[in-house]
Amino acid sequence: MTEKQQQAILAENLAIVEARIASACRRAARKRDEVTLVAVTKSVSAGIANLLPNLGVLHLGESRPQELWRKAAHAPMGIHWHLVGHLQRNKIEKTLPLVELIHSVDSLRLLAALEQESARQNRSTAILLQVNASRESGKHGFAPEVVPGLASYLTTLRHVHIRGLMTMAALEENPELCRPVFAELRTLRDTLQAKLGERHPLAELSMGMTNDFEVAIEEGATLIRIGTALFTGLQEAFR
Ligand SMILES: *Cc1c(COP(=O)(O)O)cnc(C)c1O
C-alpha cells in the first residue's frame, strides 16, 4: 500500500469517528472542543502514526513506554504524547521528557517515584489517576473507594500535578452497559475535587475507547482514547 492510499484510508476512518463524536456531543449538548481525540497508535507503525498530524490529529497515545519512546523518536514536531498504559518505575526517567500527560498512574509507589524523578529533572508532570471503576480483577488502577482518601497526599506533591481521572470500561457488546462505570468516574472526580479544593482543578476525564466512546462523551469524557476505529484497514503489517 502506498502512503497516499494509507492516508486516504486514515482520512476516511477519521471522518467516521469525527461524525460519531459530533453526534455524541450534540446529544449531550456539549461543544466539540470539550473533547480531545487521543489516537492510540499501538496497533500501527510509526509511519502510519506520523500521517495523523496531516489530518489535524496532534494528540497521540501509546500504552507501552518503550513503544512511545520509539515512535516519539521518529515523529514530526508538534505531537502531544500521552502514555495510556502501565508505567514501570524503571521507565519513568526516559518517559517524563516525552509526554504531555500520563493517564495511567495506578499506585502510590508510582506517584512517589514520579514526584522524585520530576523533582530531579526539575519538571512539572501532569497525571491522571487510573481507576478500576469496573472492578475487574487483574486490571490496573486504584479501587474507587480509596480515591477520595488520596486527596491529602496529592496536595503534598510539588512536581506531580493531578488533572483528573482515567478508566477503562469492560468490553461490552452493548456499550450502554458501560454507562454506570463512566458516570461513577465523573462522580468520583467531583468527590475528589471537593476534597482537593480549587487550587487543584480536575478538568479531565479520560474515558471511552472504540467500543464505547459515544457513551463516555455523553457522561462527560474530555479525553477519548481511540485506536481500532481509526486504524481499521491499516493494521495488517504491524505486530
Ligand atoms: C489500546 C488502548 C486504547 C484504544 O483501544 P481501541 O479499542 O483500539 O480504541 C485505549 N486506551 C488504552 C489504555 C489502550 O491500551
Image (cartoon, rainbow, N blue to C red):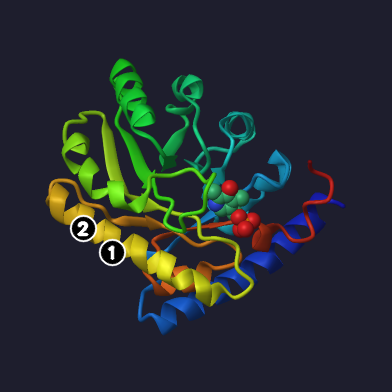
Q: CA distance from mark 1 to mark 2?
A: 6 Å
Relative vertical location of residue 160 with respect to residue 12 in this rendering, above or below: above
Q: Quadrant of residue 26?
A: bottom left
Residue to which mark 1 is pinned? 187
Q: Residues within 10 Å of mark 2 (few under 14, many from 20)?
A: some
Residue 186: x percent and y percent?
A: 32, 63
> Secondary structure beneath disc 2?
helix
**Residue most extreme to the right:** 1
- The residue sitting at 81% across, 58% down in the picture is 5
Looking at the image, residue 75 sits to the left or right of residue 93; the answer is right
Q: Which mark is residue 101?
A: none
**Residue most extreme to the bottom:** 27
Q: Residues within 10 Å of mark 1 (few under 14, many from 20)?
A: few
Residue to which mark 2 is pinned? 191
Residue type, mark 1 in image: Thr
Relative vertical location of residue 93 with respect to residue 4 in this rendering, above or below: above
Residue 94: x percent and y percent?
A: 49, 22
- The residue sitting at 57% across, 76% down in the picture is 19
> Secondary structure beneath disc 1?
helix
Q: Quadrant of residue 126?
A: top left
Looking at the image, residue 234 sits to the left or right of residue 84; the answer is right
Relative vertical location of residue 118 with respect to residue 104 in this rendering, above or below: above
